[in-house]
Amino acid sequence: MKYLLTNDFYNIFVNKRKLIYLWLLILILYPIFIRIVLDINFTDLDEIDLFLGNIGGNYNVNSVFEYLILLWNVTFYSYIVIDIFTKDVKYGRESIFLRVSKEKWLIRKLIIIFTYTTILEIFSFFILGLVYILLGANFDISTIFSIIVIDILIKLFLQFINIFLLLFSSKYSFFIIIFIYTIPFAFANFFNDYINQFTQIYFTSSYMKNSMLILVTIIIGTLALIIANKLLLEKFFERCEN
Amino acid sequence: MGIILKNVSKKFDGNYVLQDVNLNLDEGKIYGFVGRNGSGKTVLLNIICGFIKPTDGQVLVNGVDIYKTKTFPKDTRALIEKPKFLSNFTGMKNLELLASINKSITTLDIEETLKKVNLYEEKDKLYQKYSLGMKQKLGIAQVLMENPKIIILDEPFNGLDDNSADKIRKLLLEEKKLGKLIIIATHIKDDIEKLCDIVFKFDSGKIK
């Protein structure tokens, strides 16, 4: 675990530091663009909604800009997952897989994905929180903290979908799939009334909504583990050979 | 026990890179795979390690059909491609991290291996400051440090000076005496003629 953790930390936070800077820069430029270029006061908007959209956690997309920032976030996190998974198979076969079984490796990788997604999430929340306050947003800090947990769960949910897709698709078609699966969010508003009716009927409180999200995340996570069985991992390894 | 290959073939894009390879490799011997680049020896090493699935045939390592059980061979270590080490860490730290996967050896064992491959003096140098030969020795150290029963080395003398190459040759002979099964692949015939008990010559995916 120590080796894999260090190896992935090094790969993500050292080798890919320029990508992380770029990701953060675009996240930071987004509220500046809204506030200064479009000259919209935060008080005229739902600040929390805007913040969530900025962080890639608002799937009720209201504008092209929100969709683009969502796509950017999803692509970034997906790239990190691809990197965490394929690096070992491509470049670390003899040092890793002759020492650890594929199943143990997969479980450790899922833990690593959880750890680094959480680190990136908290880091981006902190930086963006400061930017929003500097731009004059009037945040209730406790609200921000409460959405961190739920947003981490959403990101993990996406990461599990990514792993699932990665096991079924090639590296290049994977990005096309990401693009396709974010498209429905761009039209989410169209279905908003139906979604609202559904949530009002089935999830009467936000606590229920959150609990359901946790439950769905756990179910998807477990399914990803089951589906990523020996056979699928085998196919994944074969694809990386060529 | 050892390694048994039965009618092993491998095709890439419809072309055979290995065809009907049958081998019986026993413990306590050093085997040499010789052939020019692209003759199929590295593909065979990858197949023995469980990294590349053969198109046909069976691979039994210590009695286990590794492709049927979808496992990697136990007690086996290999140096096939360029080893992956962390460049901002020292050679010693890199080996300690690798050893932490199995936790079967101590720091003293690692230091002992580094002395054997003649890299002890440079153990606290950053990997990025290592020369090609030092990187190669570190790769060999990661193979030997956990005392595996099967040792697989692809072009192990690449980048090594004559003195270091001789030291590694002596070390491999010592490992053989301990009952290890050692496979060495190289495109330079002189590298292994003195060292190996049996040499297999590879030509266009076939053993001659």
Image (cartoon, coloured by chain):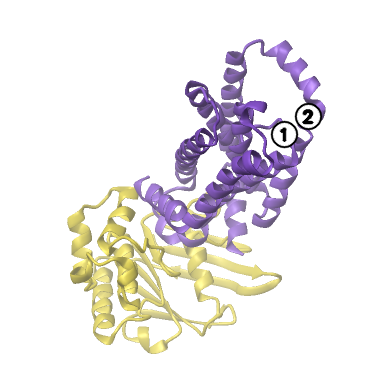
Chain colours: A purple, B yellow
Under circle 2, the secondary element is helix
Q: Which residue type does callout 2 highlight?
A: Asn
Is A93 displayed left or right of A55 in the figure? left
Q: Quadrant of residue A35?
A: top right
The spot of residue A42 in percent (x, y) is: 62, 30
Please give the label number shown on residue A112: none
**Quadrant of image for the N terminus of chain B:** bottom left
- Circle 1: element type: loop
Q: Amino acid at mark 1?
A: Val
Q: Which residue is mark 2?
A: A189
- The residue that appears at 28% across and 48% down in the rendered structure is B103
Q: Position of residue A229 (x, y in %)?
A: 57, 41
Circles 1, 2 touching at the beta carbon (< 8 Å): yes
| Residue named by callout 1 | A61
Could you tell which of marks 1 and 2 lies nearer the N-terminus? 1
Chain name for mark 2: A
Nearest the camera: A117 or B64?
A117
Q: Is residue A199 above or below residue B201?
A: above
Q: Residues within 10 Å of mark 1 (few under 14, many from 20)?
A: many
Front one among A123 and A94:
A123
B99 w.r.t. B187: above or below = above
